[in-house]
Each structure stands twice: as C-alpha cells, then as structure tokens.
Image (cartoon, rainbow, N blue to C red):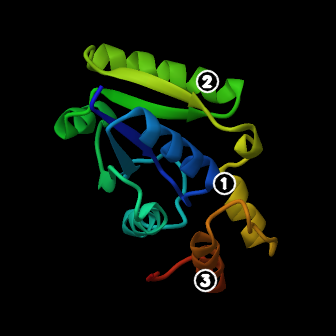
Amino acid sequence: MKTVIYPGSFDPVHNGHLDIVNRAVEMFPSVTVAVSHVVSKEMLFTPEERVAMLREVTEGMVNVRVVDYSGLTVAFARQCGASAILKGLRTMGDFEYELRMAMMNRHLAGDLDTVFLMTSPEWAFLSSTLIKEVVRLGGGVEGLVPARVAAHLRRKFEKGGSGPWTL
C-alpha cells in the first residue's frame, strides 16, 4: 500500500483522530487526511476552518497532507491514487456503521480496501459532537483536543457559534 486516505468531518479534530493519524504514519508511506464537505450533520466549523486546524496540528508530521473534498470518498481516493481508506473505530456501533460503508465502497470501487484501526482506549469515549457540547456548556476540553483547537472552539462559541473564524 502506498497512500491511504483518512476521511472524516473532523468538526473539530480531537486527540482520538490524531491517535489514528500518528499510528497511520507508522504503517503507510503517505497519509492524506481528507476533510469532507458532504456531511449529514450540522457543522460548527467550515471546511476551510477544519482543514486549517488539521494543518496546524499535523504540521511537521512526515508524509501527512490535509485536503478537503466533496463527493464520493472512493472517487476522491482514486483521484489521490490511494490504495486504501482508513477508518478509526471506537465502539461496536462505529464498526457496524463503518462496515456497511466499507462494503458499499467495495461495491463502488472493488480495488480499494478499507483499513480499520481501533482508537487507543484513552480516546475511545471522544467524539467531536461531545467535545462541542462540553465547550458550548462552558466545560473544559484541555487534554482531549490540541491546545490550539481548544482555543478555536472557545472563540467560536464566544462568537455565538457563527460568523467568520480565522486562525
């Protein structure tokens, strides 16, 4: 395998995501973190903001690039020359959902494999939705997200969760 893509919404990126990226770097010569425009949930950050945060926190990681995309993940994977799609798993619920997605992707692009990595136990409870809810209610997420991401979250919620956001 040469290139693997790690797609997701990353709204925002947290330490569970970075755990998967760090481990993927050890397994694959090239890792593309792919920030999806097409998501079925309400986003706090724009695709550009999510890409910028990911680039901040992966800066200096060898052979990691961060890009955004829209459309089918398998089409984007082919465009990137990826040989696999990487998915992080926390729970059985994640596995069941991601297995269905992997099977559909296999139907659409039989030459692409899906690789599953279990999130390290210390991050298994994390979700971007949970992180946003804690910050929205005034709680701290230090140690769960990179410090820069925590600062971006605080600023976003100070602005009422809308409006322009800049690094």
Location of mark 3 (residue) = 155
Residues under numbered marks 3 and 1 in contact, where contact means CB atoms less than 8 Å apart = no
* Image location (x, y in percent) of residue 118: 62, 30
The answer to which of marks 3 and 2 sits earlier in the sequence is: 2
Residue 62's place in the image compared with 149, above or below, is: above
- Mark seen at residue 163: none
SS under mark 2: helix
Q: Distance between the Cα atoms at labels 3 and 2?
A: 34 Å
Q: Place residue 122 in its image quadrant.
A: top right
Q: Distance between the Cα atoms at labels 3 and 1?
A: 17 Å
Q: Place residue 49 in its image quadrant.
A: bottom left
The answer to which of marks 1 and 2 sits earlier in the sequence is: 2
Type of the residue with mark 2: Phe
Residue at 29% across / 30% down in the picture?
74
Q: Distance between the Cα atoms at labels 1 and 2?
A: 18 Å
* Image location (x, y in percent) of residue 57: 49, 65
Location of mark 2 (residue) = 95
Mark 1 packing: few (<14 Cα in 10 Å), some, or many (20+)? some
Residues under numbered marks 1 and 2 in contact, where contact means CB atoms less than 8 Å apart = no
Residue at 43% across / 32% down in the picture?
27
Residue at 64% across / 72% down in the picture?
150
Mark 2 packing: few (<14 Cα in 10 Å), some, or many (20+)? some
Type of the residue with mark 3: Arg
**87 horizontally vs 1: left or right:** right
Residues under numbered marks 3 and 2 in contact, where contact means CB atoms less than 8 Å apart = no
Q: Nearer the viewer, mark 1 or mark 2?
A: 2
SS under mark 1: helix
Between 61 and 33, which is closer to the camera in this rendering? 61
Type of the residue with mark 1: Thr
Location of mark 1 (residue) = 129
Between 141 and 103, which is closer to the camera in this rendering? 141
